[in-house]
Amino acid sequence: MCQTCGCSTGHKQGHGHDHQHDHGEDHDHTHGHGHHHHEQDTEHRAIEVNTALLGQNDKLAERNRGIFLARGIAVMNLVSSPGSGKTMLLEKTLQLFGNELKLAVIVGDLATENDAMRLRRHGSPAIQIQTGTVCHLDAHMIHHAIEDLKLSDLDILFIENVGNLVCPSAFDLGEDARIVLTSVTEGEDKPLKYPSIFQDAELVLLNKTDLSAAVEFDRETALRNIREAAPGAKILEISAKTGDGLGGWFEYLRQLSRRKKSAMPK
């Protein structure tokens, strides 16, 4: 996972907060001359670091969840591979649905504020997190990002995660639902290749349906693969570009917001 891809190193995000991870490593460089099983030691160390990292993240995620629950804010963790259409979907959602409920977005990218600037044009707050070399958002980043939002004004918070179908699956952000976006241009077997990101999804959005014929997309095979990888998920077929199917997406948002408001502490 992230201990092998290199993204677990300390880093800073570009929205004004220092998010350097403390992984609890005590860099002891004393060298002995006995026979050391370096591969086993490294593997054992990686497991320890990973467990500590995820344990701390889960605690912070619960803190975030409590903050959102107290205010009745429905929070969605939107994940996909790069280029699946997350930002265009959010643009259309802000444009067409933003007058019904109060929306905001936290965007994660390795660099630039391009996506946040696109989203702000539609009148809703958008906070950009620049993760540097880190291939996912974590609960600590989200906790600091919401400091820049007026939470009392929000009904729904979208978290547009870094484009990646691997590492985000391990990190709870305090969200109410994981939404996986996949597109017809990626082929039919993405759910089988990356099952961990799909298995806990509440909703899978199959995007770019307007291109199905052009890419000779096998709809029935794709739906069968999604159901196999995400048996508990609702599936919606949409085109963020043309607007097809977005009525079902907006109704899902209404229901999720009502559910969250009803769960608020009395």
Image: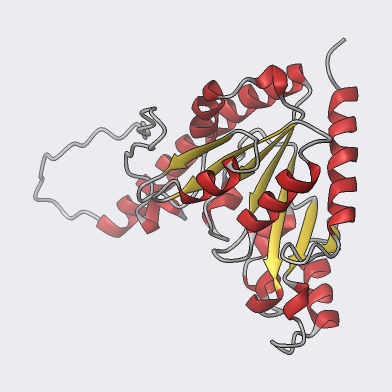
- Quadrant in which the C terminus is drawn: top right
Nearest to the observer: residue 4 or residue 250: 250
Q: Is residue 264 above or below residue 254?
A: above
Q: Is residue 184 above or below residue 69?
A: below
Q: Let me know if residue 60 appears in the view.
A: yes
Q: Measured from the top left, where is residue 158 in percent x and y?
A: 67, 40
Instruction: Give the side of residue 196 with respect to residue 54, left or right.
Output: right
Q: At x 58% / y 40%, what residue is drawn?
A: 120
Instruction: Give the side of residue 202 with respect to residue 20, left or right.
Output: right
**Badge count:** 0
Q: Is residue 218 above or below residue 114?
A: below
Residue at the top extreme of this rendering: 266
Q: Let me know if residue 66 appears in the view.
A: no
Q: Measured from the top left, where is residue 85 in percent x and y?
A: 64, 62
Q: At x 67% / y 64%, what residue is drawn?
A: 195
Q: Quadrant of residue 24?
A: top left
Q: Is residue 210 above or below residue 43?
A: below
Q: Measured from the top left, where is residue 142 in percent x and y?
A: 54, 32
